[in-house]
Amino acid sequence: MSLFDELISLTKQILPSYVDMPKSKVAKIIRTLFDIAIRFPGKGRNQPLIDLSTHVIEWCNKESRSFLRMKIENKLDELYFKQTRYQDSLKLLSKLLHELKKRDDKLLIVESQLVESKVYHALENLPKAKASLTAVKTTANSIYIVPMLQSDIDMMSGLIAADERDYNTAYSYFYETFEGY
């Protein structure tokens, strides 16, 4: 059993022991373990991460931990995107975005709409990809965006500009992305 598999197994096993802990501490611990698992190098890591995500989401639903569930659902959307399971991603995104707009969590809305834009771009639905990206930029203007997320937004803007054959604008966005990374 590899270290990656042990981390996934450990995360699943210790979830029930978090019932009595404060929700914010549990969310921090689970997100940290999940982020470590995502950054693990190697191929074939997406399916175990999807399984872990669904396990954590089910646990969150049982324990009424909606904020952690929404964060993990956003990560699950990205994993579906990476596995080219676009319809699964869009189905989960529509439900998630509706819920996020009620809660007004702008940072998570930006991250989710960016994934939505990537999915539509991959499906070659340029109008919807552009609409999602416009929504991302509108929401992002009202909050602080970390540089890596801003670079992802610029990268998506550059890809859409290149698809529209506006190469000067695409170059500008790609240069901003390069600077951000």
Image (cartoon, rainbow, N blue to C red):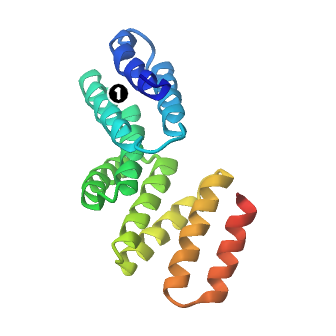
In the rendered image, the quadrant that contains the N terminus is top left
As drawn, the residue found furthest toward the right would be 179
Q: Residue at x 67, y 66 (%)?
A: 177
In the rendered image, the quadrant that contains the C terminus is bottom right
As drawn, the residue found furthest toward the bottom would be 165
**Front one among 53 and 93:** 53
Three-letter code for the amino acid on which mark 1 is drawn: Arg
Residue 103 position (above or below residue 64) = below
Q: Taking the image as drawn, is residue 103 in sight? A: no
Does residue 24 appear to the left or right of 62 in the view shown?
Answer: right
Residue 15: give x, y in percent of width and height.
36, 17
Q: Residue at x 40, y 46 (%)?
A: 74
Q: Residue at x 54, y 66 (%)?
A: 137
Q: Quadrant of residue 45?
A: top left
Residue 2 position (above or below residue 87) = above
Q: How many marks?
A: 1
Q: Which residue is mark 1?
A: 65
Residue 180: give x, y in percent of width and height.
72, 60
Q: Residues within 10 Å of mark 1 (few under 14, many from 20)?
A: some
Circle 1 SS class: loop
Does residue 39 appear to the left or right of 69 in the view shown?
Answer: right
Residue 174: give x, y in percent of width and height.
66, 73
Residue 165 position (above or below residue 1) = below
Residue 63: give x, y in percent of width and height.
29, 21
Does residue 85 appear to the left or right of 170 in the view shown?
Answer: left
Q: Quadrant of residue 171?
A: bottom right
Q: Taking the image as drawn, is residue 102 in sight? A: yes
Residue 10 position (above or below residue 105) = above
